[in-house]
Structure formats: C-alpha cells, structure tokens
C-alpha cells in the first residue's frame, strides 16, 4: 500500500494523464448538480463561488454563463488550462479564474470570506477519512457565517460499490483512479458542526450519487 503522499502524487499524475488524453473528459454539458446548485445559490442571493476539483470546468463555465463569478481550483494543470482556454473563447474570463491547488493543502482564502463552495465528485477521490475531515474543516473556516457548501459523491448504492479493488480504509481503485463510496453515516460525520440542509440521493447516467447541502452556522 502506498503512503498518503505517494498515493496523492500518483493520483495527480493519473488525472493529469487523463486530461491530456481527453480535454473534454467529463463532457461539455454541466452536471445535474451544477444545474441544481445555480438555483440554490441564486435564491440565496449568492453571486460568487469557490469551486474545488473543478476539472476542465464544465460546471465553472456553466455557473459563469448564469452570471456567477467563479474561482475554480484543481490539482491538474492540464484541466485548468483547458478551462482557461474555454473561458476566454466564450468571453467569460472576467468571471472565471482558475488556480492550481491540492485540497490536501490549506485553502488560500482568509477566514470567513467566501460565500459559497461547490465541489462535484471531488470528496469521493483518494482522501483518507482524516484528510476528508480536515478538508471540510477548511471549507468551514473560509466560508462566511451562513455560507453554503454543496458537494456530491458516489454513493454505496452505486453498482460499482464493492466491485473495485479494495485498498483498505474505504478506498478502492479501478483503471488507476482511486476513490471512496460514501454512505449516509460518513456524510453525517462530515456535517458535524454544520447545519445540514439535505442529503439527496440521485442518479446521473448510470451512477448513484449523493448531493449534500450544508451551511456554516450563522453564530
Ligand atoms: C471526478 S473529477 C470531477 C471534475 C469536475 N468537478 C466535474 O464534475 O467535471 C474529480 C476532479 O478532482 C480533482 N482532484 C482529485 N484530487 C484532488 C486534490 N487532492 N486536489 C485538487 N483536485 C483534486 C481531479 O483532478 C479531477 O479534476
């Protein structure tokens, strides 16, 4: 079994290679979660979003087209290059910024300065449970009181659950990618000291997922 650092490095290389092979790896259309999140953030009067694990930006670009300012981060430079190119081509570069960042490192924003954080299919990547807990703590730190966090993850109801090679600590691997299937218990554990708005099971393509909405308590 690789150490945490070795695993992280290998995953960064794996994602980088995948994006170099296919610039539109996740397609050009926004995810179902992004379409839903636009309505939630819009109704909450939010107009700027920090997106983590944005990939080549199908959702960041969609959010920007809907009028949001988006700061998108990922640990793959190839994906971010594609995102920047597309933002420029669509004339959205005044509303979309992109920066290389590994979410195992502290988030750059200062305490309480971010209105909303969005992460589609990032938390189910190759993170230990301890890394997940510190990432969620970091997100809470940077959000302003009342700020919103929406994220999605693979669910243990997915047909892939239990069919990939087990790496221990709840992680599994297929085709060189490492990830974790979430059950409701883990979602609730990560929502400790948050206001949990909802845990919605949903399906996209053939995948069974959870969409989680939580808010940093106002006081
Ligand atoms: C399943 S893809 C989802 C991409 C994008 N959110 C979307 O839905 O199109 C997961 C993304 O997380 C990124 N990622 C994985 N581990 C990361 C880490 N430790 N820090 C930052 N990004 C990471 C990968 O590079 C990849 O772009």
Image (cartoon, helix red, strand yellow):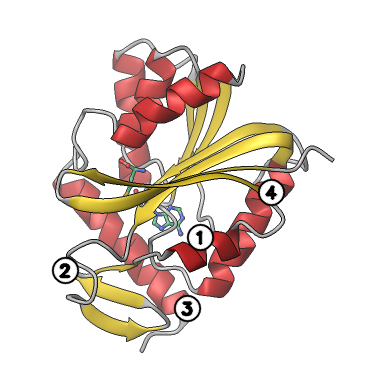
Dot 2, crowdedness within 10 Å: few (<14), some or many (≥20)? few
Mark-to-mark CA distance, 4 and 1: 15 Å
Mark 2 residue element? loop
- Count of marks, rendered view: 4
Q: Are marks 2 and 3 in contact (CB under 8 Å)?
A: no
Q: Residues within 10 Å of mark 3 (few under 14, many from 20)?
A: few
Location of residue 180 in the rendering, given as x and y in whole percent from the top left corner: 36, 68
Q: Give how far apart the Cα atoms at labels 3 and 4 are.
A: 23 Å
Residue 187, numbered label: 1
Q: Is residue 182 left or right of residue 142?
A: left
**Residue positioned 50% across, 67% down in the render:** 186
Real-space CA distance between mark 2 and mark 1, rounded to the nearest whole angstrom: 26 Å
Q: Mark 2 vs mark 4: give the one in front.
A: 4
Residue 140's disc number: 4
Q: Quadrant of the C terminus?
A: top right
Q: Which residue is nearer to you in this view: 78 or 51? A: 51
Residue underneath mark 3 = 4
In primary-sequence order, the first of circles 4 and 1 is 4
- x, y percent for residue 173: 25, 74
Comparing 200 with 19, the one in front is: 200
Nearer to us: label 3 or label 4: 4
Q: Residue at x 69, y 48 (%)?
A: 140
Read off the residue under disc 2: 175
- The first of marks 3 and 1 along the sequence is 3
Which residue is outermost to the right?
Answer: 219
């Amino acid at each position: 079994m690789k150490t945490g650092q070795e695993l992280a490095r290998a995953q960064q290389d794996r994602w980088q290679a995948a994006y170099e092979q296919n610039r539109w790896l996740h397609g050009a259309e926004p995810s179902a979660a992004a379409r839903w999140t636009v309505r939630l953030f819009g109704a909450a009067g939010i107009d700027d979003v920090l997106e983590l694990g944005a990939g080549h930006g199908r959702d960041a670009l969609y959010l920007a087209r809907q009028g949001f300012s988006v700061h998108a981060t990922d640990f793959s430079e190839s994906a971010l290059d594609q995102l920047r190119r597309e933002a420029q081509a669509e004339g959205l570069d005044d509303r979309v910024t992109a920066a290389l960042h590994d979410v195992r490192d502290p988030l750059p924003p200062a305490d309480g300065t971010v209105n909303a954080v969005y992460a589609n299919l990032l938390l189910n990547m190759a993170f230990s449970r301890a890394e997940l807990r510190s990432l969620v703590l970091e997100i809470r730190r940077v959000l302003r009181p009342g700020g919103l966090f929406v994220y999605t993850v693979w669910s243990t109801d997915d047909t892939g659950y239990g069919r990939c090679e087990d790496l221990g600590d709840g992680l599994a691997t297929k085709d060189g990618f490492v990830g974790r299937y979430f059950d409701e218990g883990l979602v609730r554990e990560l929502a400790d000291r948050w206001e949990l708005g909802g845990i919605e099971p949903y399906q996209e393509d053939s995948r069974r997922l959870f969409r989680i909405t939580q808010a940093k308590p106002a006081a």
